């Protein structure tokens, strides 16, 4: 079976999102999200594109530098044991969300297409983390509206059902 790096990253990203909302193993989610994000970041760099986590102006500078350091530390711990086989790590599962966000935005930018499963995650992330973004973020109005209408970012079961709906009938959800 021949696949492209874009196809591999898309499959990894999609499964990371599904596993996240099914509350499956956080380390598996992070490993998939990290692999997808790295591939998509490298593909984007080859096309002169920037990363929403590593260089997007709508993310606050003080948050971005902390994010990048934590993300790199977790990814390196989870994939290397050559220099520190007995090391332990204080893993923060929430970091996976930043990797998935990066992957979702880069996938959209690279393909110029919106995937329903990716848009579900993107909306969830924006509503869950409104303070990460600058006040004049292009989606600020939608974020505020979703919060006012009671969008529950903790209802993973409902979000997982939306993902299944998007999987089985992509036309059911308009992007």
Image: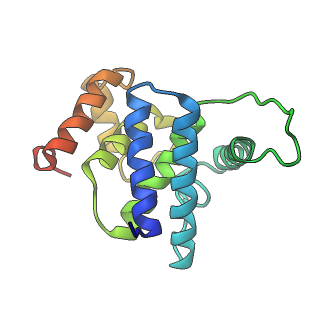
Closest to the observer, 48 or 6: 6
Q: Residue at x 47, y 67 (%)?
A: 5
Closest to the observer, 9 or 122: 9
* Residue 167 pos. (x, y %): 22, 44
Answer yes or no: is residue 128 visible. yes
* Residue 123 pos. (x, y %): 34, 41
Q: Is residue 113 above or below residue 85?
A: below
Answer yes or no: is residue 134 visible. no
Closest to the observer, 129 or 136: 129
Q: Residue at x 28, y 58 (%)?
A: 114
Name the side, left or right, on which 54 lies relative to 86. left
Describe the colour scheme in one phrase: rainbow
* Residue 28 pos. (x, y %): 54, 36
Name the side, left or right, on which 171 lies relative to 10. left
Q: Residue at x 33, y 28 (%)?
A: 147
* Residue 126 pos. (x, y %): 41, 40
Name the side, left or right, on which 27 lies relative to 113. right
Quadrant in the picture for residue 165 = top left
Q: Residue furthest front?
A: 1
Q: How many numbered circles are shown?
A: 0
Quick one: quadrant of the N terminus? Answer: bottom left
Quadrant in the picture for residue 125 = top left
Q: Is residue 48 above or below residue 125?
A: below
Quadrant in the picture for residue 27 = top right
């Amino acid at each position: 079976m021949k696949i492209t790096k874009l196809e591999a990253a898309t499959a990894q990203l999609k499964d990371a999102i599904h596993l996240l909302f099914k509350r499956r193993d956080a380390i598996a989610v992070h490993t998939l999200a990290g692999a997808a994000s790295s591939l998509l970041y490298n593909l984007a760099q080859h096309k002169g594109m920037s990363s929403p986590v590593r260089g997007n102006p709508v993310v606050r500078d003080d948050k971005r530098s902390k994010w990048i350091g934590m993300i790199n530390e977790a990814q390196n711990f989870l994939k290397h044991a050559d220099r520190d086989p007995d090391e332990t790590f204080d893993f923060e599962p929430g970091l996976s969300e930043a990797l998935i966000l990066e992957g979702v935005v880069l996938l959209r930018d690279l393909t110029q297409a919106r995937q329903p499963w990716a848009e579900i995650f993107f909306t969830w992330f924006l509503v869950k983390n409104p303070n990460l973004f600058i006040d004049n973020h292009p989606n600020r109005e939608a974020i505020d509206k979703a919060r006012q209408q009671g969008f529950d970012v903790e209802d993973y079961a409902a979000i997982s059902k939306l993902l299944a709906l998007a999987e089985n009938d992509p036309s059911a959800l308009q992007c």
